[in-house]
Amino acid sequence: ACLESVQRHGGYHRLILIDDGSSDERIGALFRRLAASGSSQLVLLRDSQGADALPLLAFTLERLFDERLQDKRLALADYSRMGGVKGAIEAAAGKAQAAAVAAGVPAQDLDTLLRRTFLPHLARVNDAGEFARRVAELSELDRDCLPLVTVLVAQRLLIADQRGDVKTVEIAHEAILREWPLLRGWLDAERGF
C-alpha cells in the first residue's frame, strides 16, 4: 500500500492510502507536497519505510491516539517523546515490563519470563529462517508467565482471543518480532541453531 493523497480537512491533513504498487516517484511527490505545507505528517511518513511500514505506522498512530498528551490532540512532540515509529514498540514493551514489575513480577526474573513466554510458544524461526508468530493456547504457557501476557495484551503487543472453549494468545503483528530489539535478539540466537 502507498499514500495516494494528502487532503486538508479543517485544520488537519487526511492521508489516503491505496494498494496499487505505486512507484517511488509518486511517493516522492507526496513527500514534497507535505514538506511544502510544513506538515508534521512528513515525519511519520519519513519514519515509515520498509516492509513493516504500514503495521508500524498503524501501531504508532494507535498509541499516539491513546496517549495524546497536548490538549487531546496528536502532537509531533508526543510522537518524538514516544521514540517515533521505530520506538513505539520498544516503548510499549518498556511500559509492559514496568507494569509487570508493579504487578509483582520480580524484576530480576523479567527477561527470563519474557523469553519463556515468547519462545517457543508465540514466536519461532521458520524453515526459511524468517521470524514467524504462532497462536498459542493460554494453557500452554507457564503459569508464572501469565501476568506478563496480561500486560503485553494491555499494551497491544499481544492479542488474546477465545476460540470456542479455548483461550488463545498471539503476537499482534509480525513486525513486533523484527522491531522489538530484545525479542529480535532471542530469535536471532534461535536462528543460529
Image (cartoon, helix red, strand yellow):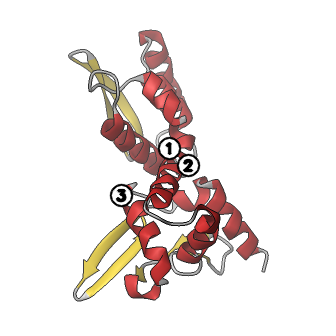
Which residue is drawn at the image coordinates 39% and 23% (left, top)? 75
Quarter of the view holding residue 188: bottom right
Which numbered tag is attached to residue 154?
Answer: 3
Q: Of the residues shown, which amino acid type is indicated by label 2?
A: Glu
The picture places residue 102, in percent across and down from the top left corner, at 45, 56
Q: Is residue 60 visible?
A: yes
Q: Is residue 26 visible?
A: no
The picture places residue 173, in percent across and down from the top left corner, at 45, 61
Q: Are circles 1 and 3 on residues that touch, CB within 8 Å?
A: no
Which residue is drawn at the image coordinates 49% and 84% (left, top)? 142
Q: State the residue in front, 192 or 91.
A: 91
Which numbered tag is attached to residue 88?
Answer: 1
Q: Are circles 2 and 1 on residues that touch, CB within 8 Å?
A: yes
Q: Residues within 10 Å of mark 3 (few under 14, many from 20)?
A: some
Q: Of the residues shown, which amino acid type is indicated by label 3?
A: Ala
Identify the element where label 2 is drawn.
Answer: helix
Identify the element where label 1 is drawn.
Answer: helix
3D distance between C-alphas at marks 1 and 3: 14 Å
3D distance between C-alphas at marks 2 and 3: 14 Å
Q: State the residue in front, 86 or 50.
A: 86
For this view, does 117 lie left or right of residue 8? right
Q: Which residue is mark 2?
A: 90
Return the disc, 2 or 3, that comes first in the chain's sequence: 2
